[in-house]
Amino acid sequence: MVQSRPKLLVTGGAGFIGSHFVDLAVQQGYDVTVLDALTYAGSRTNIASTPHQFVEGDICDAGLVKGLFEKDSFHAVIHFAAESHVDRSILGPGEFIRTNVQGTQTLLEQSLIAWRKSSPVLRESFRFIQISTDEVFGSLGPEGSFTETHPYQPNSPYAASKAAADLIVRAYCKTYGLPCIITHCSNNYGPRQFPEKLIPHMIQSALLNRPLGVYGKGTNVRDWLHVTDHCQGVLLALEKGKPGAHYCFGGGKEMNNLEIVQLLCHLLDESRPRSDGQKHESKIQFVEDRLGHDFRYSIDSSFAQKELGYRAKVRFDSGLKETVQWYLQSKQTQEAEIK
């Protein structure tokens, strides 16, 4: 008898991080169904070269999600789908509450119904992986790092919506026994990221000869993690993680926003010099700071290293250089307007 490949339902699989996970999961022998609403940040182009089943739809649509579980016996749900940009959450928090909270609960409920009906073997191996963020932990001072036991102190509507979703995941795990795992990551970078986030936004702004607006004095610090390292961590959580556990994945590369922008300018000076002979850094402008802007994020990945064998492998200097080259070679990225 031919052993069927384990099936995954990957929500948000046409987005930045989700698409890289789809690539990795298929390479590792999983049969992947992608559920994605194809909002502004998602594109089927991201997964066009990777075999998968695609369903366009909203994670808040209980009937649609129920139908997917009735059609396939999924071994796991990998839940990437989310509204994720802090600035957008400040301007319109309602959509973040709907997608991130209601959508997560809808997925959990349909997962629970299907899980209860499944075979004992599938019940034992099933996992619901909630892809969360370090932002649920709030802001750090100049020292210390987030760990899996850090208290939740979200400061933005986005972070609050993810924190609420995490707590609902925890409740389904503790109350109903649904095998759930929550992962937290630091700031991701790499190819395919929509140009509203810092790195692609600055690259595209530079290519369009626009001002490079940096919040406040540019001193806010982030821990940078290459998207492929994050996805490897999620796969480890799926295959080795314990239900009810949290796992933190960081890149171990802290830099403030101004340093990141200056480094990007240097790379662009080498690869795409300005026609007027000026340095890209001359376009840097300091703008009014974001409301409730968290000062610093930092992740301690030692628990994930011990329990899962996780470690970040991509060197930041080479990863950032390759990322810049990807955007320079992407005609779609160069021509798109920053929304």
Image: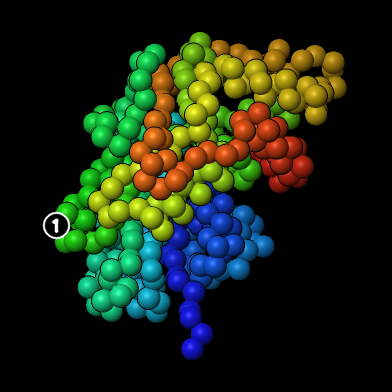
Q: Residue at x 85, y 15 (%)?
A: 277
Q: Residue at x 51, y 10 (%)?
A: 217
Give how far across and how far down residue 7 sits, in percent.
45, 70
Give how far across and how far down residue 29 sits, in percent.
54, 67
Q: Is residue 70 left or right of residue 207?
A: left
How many C-alpha atoms fall within 10 Å of the one at disc 1: few (<14), some, or many (≥20)?
A: few
The image quarter in which residue 173 lies: bottom left
Q: Which of the pair 201/20 is nearer the observer?
A: 20
Query: Is residue 34 something one can see in this rendering?
Result: yes
Q: Residue furthest left?
A: 175
Q: Is residue 151 above or below residue 241?
A: above
Query: Is residue 94 something one can see in this rendering?
Result: no
Q: How is the image coloured?
A: rainbow
The residue that label 1 is drawn on is 175
Give how far across and how far down residue 315 sits, in percent.
62, 33
Q: Is residue 112 above or below residue 81?
A: below
Q: Residue at x 40, y 52 (%)?
A: 237
Q: Which of the pair 27/325 is nearer the observer?
A: 27
Q: Give the structural element (helix, strand or loop) at label 1.
A: helix
Give how far across and how far down residue 329 sits, in percent.
77, 42
Q: Quadrant of the C terminus?
A: top right
Amino acid type for the residue under numbered disc 1:
Thr
Q: Residue at x 57, y 16 (%)?
A: 258
Q: Residue furthest bottom?
A: 1
Q: Is residue 151 left or right of residue 128?
A: left
